[in-house]
Amino acid sequence: MQKNQRPKIIKNGGGAIFLVALFLLWVTTTSAVTTISVTNPLGGTCNDLVCILDKVAGALWWIGSPLAVMMVIWGAIQILTSAGNAERVKTGKHTILYAVVGIIFLLLAGGLNLIIQSLFA
């Protein structure tokens, strides 16, 4: 077959459209038969923004507060094992400071939910 000659079915484009339509028809009929159920990972009780934010803030609190306590303990260990090294003392103080800032952000996340709840209630 020469370069400029193409089969009629491709040249007219009708065959390609037919194949795409046939494929889409097959996909829609098979997807109509298949039932997919997704469970709500938040517990299935949330129907509004306030409930979702409350769940997210609660999850952040349960994950973040033990991490912040561990970071305060790690900062204290850094200070105690510094052996007079001013740089390690400074690093330990910064670790404790960042852990306290993290706790403040966790508290603000819970308070943000109350603010949004009072605005939309």
Image (cartoon, rainbow, N blue to C red):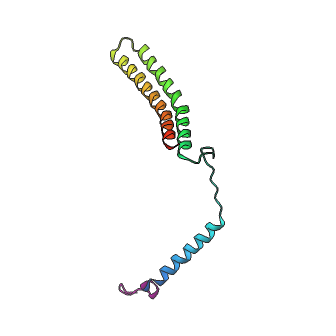
Q: Residue at the location (55% across, 35% down)?
A: 58
Residue 26 sits above or below residue 70 on the image: below
Is residue 98 on the magenta stretch? no
The location of residue 25, given as percent across then percent down, is 58, 74
Observer-nearest of 94 and 8: 94
Is residue 7 on the magenta stretch? yes
Q: Residue at the location (55% across, 74% down)?
A: 23
- Main SS of the magenta segment? loop
Q: Residue at the location (47% across, 27% down)?
A: 103
> Residue 36 falls in which quadrant of the image?
bottom right
> Residue 3 falls in which quadrant of the image?
bottom left
Observer-nearest of 16 and 115: 115
> Residue 6 falls in which quadrant of the image?
bottom left
Q: Report the number of discs.
A: 0
Left/right placement of residue 29 relative to residue 8 reads right
Residue 90 sits above or below residue 7 on the image: above
Left/right placement of residue 58 relative to residue 101 reads right
Observer-nearest of 12 and 65: 65
Q: Residue at the location (52% across, 81% down)?
A: 18
**Magenta stretch in the rendered image:** 1-11
The location of residue 108, given as percent across then percent down, is 46, 32
Extreme residue toward the left, this view: 86
The location of residue 34, given as percent across then percent down, is 65, 64
Which quadrant, please, contains the N terminus? bottom left
Residue 51 sits above or below residue 81 on the image: below
The location of residue 64, given as percent across then percent down, is 51, 31
Left/right placement of residue 91 relative to residue 62 reads left
Residue 63 sits above or below residue 30 on the image: above
